[in-house]
Image (cartoon, rainbow, N blue to C red):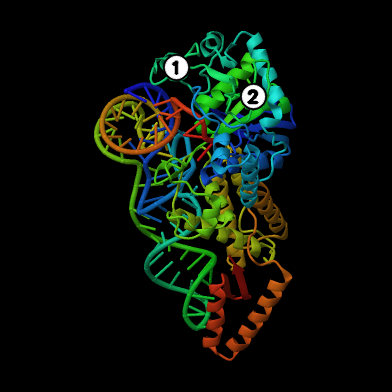
Amino acid sequence: MNSELKIYNTLTREKEIFKPLNAPHVGMYVCGPTLYSHAHLGNCRTFLSFDVVFRYLKHLGYKVRYVRNITDVGHLESDGDEGEDKIAKRARLEKLEPMEIVQLYAVDFHKVLDDFNLLPPSIEPTASGHIIEQIEMTKKIIENGLAYEVDGTIWFDVEKFAMDYPYTELSGRKLDEMLDGTRDNLEGQEEKRGRLDFALWKKAKPEHIMRWTSPWGEGFPGWHIECSAMSSKYLGEQFDIHGGGMDLIPTHHTNEVAQNVACCKKSPAKVWMHTNMLTVNGQKMSKSLGNSFLPEQLFTGSHPLLERGYSAMVVRFFMLQAHYSSTLDFSNTALQASEKGCQRLMNAMKLMAGLKTSDKSSFNFENLKADIYNALNDDFNTPLAIAGLFEGAGVINSVNDGKATITAADKEQLQKLFSEIVFDVLGLKEETGAGSDKVDGLMNLIIELRKDVRAKKDFAASDKIRDELLKVGIQVKDGKEGVTWTSN
RNA sequence: GGUCGGGUGGCCGAGUGGUUAGGCUCAGCUCUGCAAAAGCUGCUACAGCGGUUCAAGUCCGCUCCCGACCUCCA
């Protein structure tokens, strides 16, 4: 518990003690979704990982401003001039206004994240709402001599930039090798000076729907400039944490850093955090591979890869049982294991309030607490923290069985610890059908009736009640201290 | 082809030099009218080969296998 929070920094390739630039304030930026289709489960993993980061930082007492953008102007399909805006393409296919598409998927996106119990970010800015900022930043980069215009399109001059600044710092690649990769890069890119140059502003073709006026004519912003513009607007030229999926490192984040440095001479984030991919049978989940599924399909089980449906909290728990920086392989058996584990943990929490207290505790509360906090402080090691929670669950169950003891003070502390870690930090929540007065009342009645028939040794009737309840997802347990039930 | 990351027991998945990860599964026991739950016990590990070390899953080298990125991608 005396340990300090350490975070693995992609920039330095080391775990570093976290020291905010302006404690107690923390600025965090995470690259959000491009709203051209539904977010799949792999996308959700990243946002879930940063939700825990957000929650834990807040739990530690920091005042966190968490900015997660929404990309609603569309990225190009290719690096060349041929690319069609993803959102515009979708709009054409669905015969809708581009902003209708964005709205449709924005609503869906927020619903999904809400299902997974993600806290909303402090600010969720859209690219289309910050065209002016992006134009201004582009102008500055041109003024600084690191971008050039060719026929209404502004290109970032990577090689010139790289002469003075470490362009490949994040990716760890070698510039020469990147330049050497001379393949299929001619089409539509004749106007670029360098192979690695990327667009800050694109000239809009006549048929392009989403367009804005700029000093260079009608067009739209490039892929990377929005994050630079919005992060510096809301978090300043330098802030604490920048996050995203690790597949963004070599291109998007590398270029983002370059833009900020080219504009303001400052690298935007002190710490870069990257989450790893969700895999299916060892392969990255992605739309193009056809192995992705949507949260909705996961909940209902309506996908060939799924044996049945799983609840959002089970999926959340499943994801938290792996470290964010590791690949996590999806499978039905793994999800089923998480489901049972999650239930075990939740059941232990329910037992806690009713535990009998003693003069002595047969376990060391401070050690348990330290284990959990040390785990979280070690680069948000949620699987290890969960292992600590299970240790606590074992204690709770043992006390409940009369095989261990707990003092009133420890019980109170344990309840507080579990509540804070499980609910506040890990973001899990109860999702049983129970809780309503009506359901509780009905269950009490049923259990009373069952008690009566059991007293008469009418076990056939007793078992029938139990079996029928199980069919609707309610499990009855005949314990020593009476009958309890759980719902899933 | 280049760059980077990884290969842990039946499954998922922590762990970077010496100490039980944890969850799930399976078997046995306790409890139970029977179950379930819970508790206890047991089972199968560190891809391979070599090296460093008193000591290696953990460090070094090589081999094999896998993945990610290099093109939009969380």
- Subunit under mark 1: A
10 Å neighbourhood of mark 2: few (<14), some, or many (≥20)?
Answer: many
Residue A28: name its quadrant: top right
Q: Nearer the viewer, residue A451 or A100?
A: A100
Residue A265 visible, this angle: no
Q: Nearer the viewer, residue A222 or A425?
A: A222
User: Where does residue B45 sit, x and y in percent of width and height?
Assistant: 34, 47
Above or below, A65 relative to A132:
below
Residue A229: name its quadrant: top right
In which quadrant is the C terminus of chain A drawn?
A: bottom right
- Disc 1 is placed on an element classified as loop
- Disc 2 is placed on an element classified as helix
Residue hosting label 1: A174
Q: Which residue is at a point 43% across and 56% down the rendered structure image?
A: A333
Name which residue type carries label 1: Lys
Residue hosting label 2: A228
User: Where does residue A107 sit, x and y in percent of width and height?
Assistant: 65, 46
Q: Which residue is at a point 46% across and 53% down the rendered structure image?
A: A334
Above or below, A198 relative to A389:
above
- Compare marks 1 and 2 and give the one earlier in the sequence: 1
